[in-house]
Structure formats: C-alpha cells, structure tokens
Image (cartoon, helix red, strand yellow):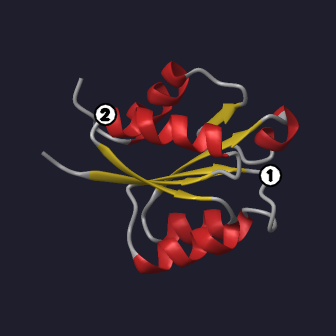
Amino acid sequence: MTQFSALIVEDEATIAELVATMLEAHGIRPTISNGVTDAMRQIDGQTFSLVLVDLTLPDGGPDALIAAARARGSHVIIMSGDPDRLAGYAPLPRLEKPFRMKALLEQVRQVLPLAG
C-alpha cells in the first residue's frame, strides 16, 4: 500500500488537528505547520503527496509556498473562509471554511488514489 503524506499549513490548531485526524484515518501521514516559514522549511526537507494551505497565515501570504509545493510535485488544496480569496486561486482545488470533513475527503480523493 502506498503511503501518502500531507502537510497541513493551518494556524488554527483545532482545524489542523481535525484535518490531521481525518487524514490519518484514511492512511495519510499528516504533518502540521502553523505558518509559511515553517511550511517552507518542511517542504525543503521532504516531499509531501498533498499540501493543504490556509490562505490567511500569520507570517505572510502563501503564494511562494504554493508554488514551491507544486514545483516539488505535491498536490495542493487551498482553504479559506473568504470566498473571494479562494476564487483568486482557481483552478486549484479549494475548501471554503467552515467545511465538513466529508467535503475535505472528497477533495483529497480527487487528487490522491485512496482506497475506499
């Protein structure tokens, strides 16, 4: 079985933990990062199958992070409570907060070949 890994870039710990728990339940190894700087360090050190990125982070915009993740072959799903910001990142897969875990799983299944 292929082991997928995901980097969750989210500064709201409750959301990050919920997403991590859901991904882990589906065989994806999660790593949580609370900002752009730490996330850039994470993707420099390893390759992730999937990077979930909140568009509003405390230490800056996510554009360089998204570009770096995609350049390394990671699938990217963006998250935000602001539908206008999400629209600016089309055609990337996106989730509008608040979202249900089922909606997140549907997005993940579109980019990763998960069993079940």
Give me the residue at 53% from left, 34% from top.
18
**Depth check, front residue: 66 or 101:** 101
Q: Is residue 47 above or below residue 77?
A: below
Residue 56's disc number: 1
Sequence-first tag of 2 and 1: 2
Does 93 sit left or right of 107 as displayed? right
Q: How many marks?
A: 2
CB atoms of marks 2 and 1 within 8 Å: no
Q: From where the camera sits, is residue 71 visible?
A: yes
Q: Position of residue 1 (x, y in %)?
A: 12, 45
Give me the residue at 46% from left, 42% from top.
20
Give me the residue at 73% from left, 64% from top.
63
Does 4 sit left or right of 30 as displayed? left
- Quarter of the image where one finds residue 48: bottom left
**What is the C-alpha distance between the residues marked 2 and 1?**
26 Å
Label 2: which residue? 26
**Depth check, front residue: 78 or 29:** 29
Mark 2, residues whose alpha carbon is within 10 Å: few (<14), some, or many (≥20)?
few
Give me the residue at 75% from left, 51% from top.
55
Q: Is residue 70 above or below residue 80?
A: below
Q: Position of residue 45 (x, y in %)?
A: 43, 79
- Residue type at numbered disc 1: Thr
